[in-house]
Amino acid sequence: MAQSLNFEPIALAHRDRVEEIRRTFGNTLYVYSFASLFAWKTEEQYEICFLGNAFLIKNGAQGENAYLFPCGEDGDKKKLLDLLLQNGNPDLYSLTEEDVCFLENAYPKKFLFTECRDEFIYLYDKQEQIELKGSSFKRLRHRINSGRSEANEWKTEALTDKNVQRALAINQKWAELNNGRLADTTAAQLALENFSQLSMWGLIFTADGEDTAYVAGSFITPEIFDMCFCKVLSKGCDFFIRWSAYSALPPEVKTVDCEDDLGIEGLRINKLSRHPKELIHIWKGSLIND
């Protein structure tokens, strides 16, 4: 009889173990950070299973046999994959080039790989985004200055448990203004409601005394910051808000992860116009039926 995998809903009690495994074995994809897993657990119907020094995420929103590629020590990842293959025909998501090589070596000619452009991850050089030197950043400089000019006085506060209700109010108003077009409103709310427990970092922006935007994210490593959520009530200020957030990040941060574009045309244009230093390619692996 095949051994079963025991999945359970993601809870705050899993945070330390997830982060220890992820950091120990060098996984820097934002998808696997505990803050991201917890924030998206409802929308993506995430469940988690641990085996030794690895964990596996079931992604119920993608289907009954959908999983993120295991995270952790290679031997334990292989054990998790072996159990998946014994119990069904899994589809594996969030594969990097390294993960594709892992599967090709461990299970030759067993998987078909499909590149997922909508899930490519945008990485930005923090200092480059602050300095904006050269002609390639001319339009971005203009947009930032245009956003800054929309208010006579801008103020920035660190986001904490004491003022997080204001960020939640911005989040709700943003959802109303956008008619729920993006699915991350619920994820953002869950993250904000558990802001300190998730060890997140963020800012609230006021324009002429009115709460206008917030930024919230987590540190994938001390050098990589994941900008999980950025909600701006005045669309013309988006570039200025992001530039201000980059400028306020701790000096040890070198890279800002702005996640994927969900295949949304306007979001893709926005992210590309900010000149990412790298796009991390992501694949899906599907088992080939014999």
Image (cartoon, rainbow, N blue to C red):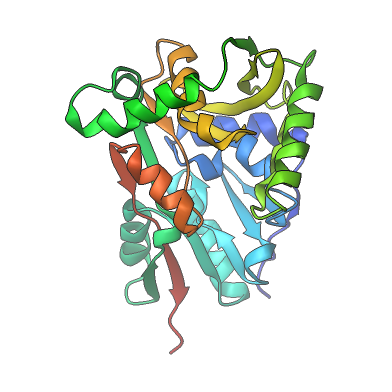
Counting from the top left corner in percent of width and height, residue 133 is at 22, 21
Point out the residue furthest to the left here: 135
Q: Is residue 248 above or below residue 4?
A: above
Front residue (pair 156, 235): 235
Could one spot residue 240 in this view of the protein? yes
Q: Is residue 146 above or below residue 118?
A: above
Q: Is residue 177 above or below residue 253?
A: below
- Residue 199 placement, left or right of 290: right
Counting from the top left corner in percent of width and height, residue 221 is at 46, 25
- Residue 22 placement, left or right of 184: left
Q: Residue at x 81, y 23 (%)?
A: 165
Point out the residue furthest to the bottom here: 290
Q: Residue at x 46, y 38 (%)?
A: 258
Counting from the top left corner in percent of width and height, residue 123 is at 37, 37
Q: Residue at x 68, y 49 (%)?
A: 178
Quarter residue 89 falls in:
bottom right
Q: Residue at x 26, y 30 (%)?
A: 137
Front residue (pair 260, 24): 260
Could one spot residue 220 in this view of the protein? no
Q: Is residue 124 above or below residue 73?
A: above
Q: Quadrant of the N terminus?
A: bottom right
Front residue (pair 201, 110): 201
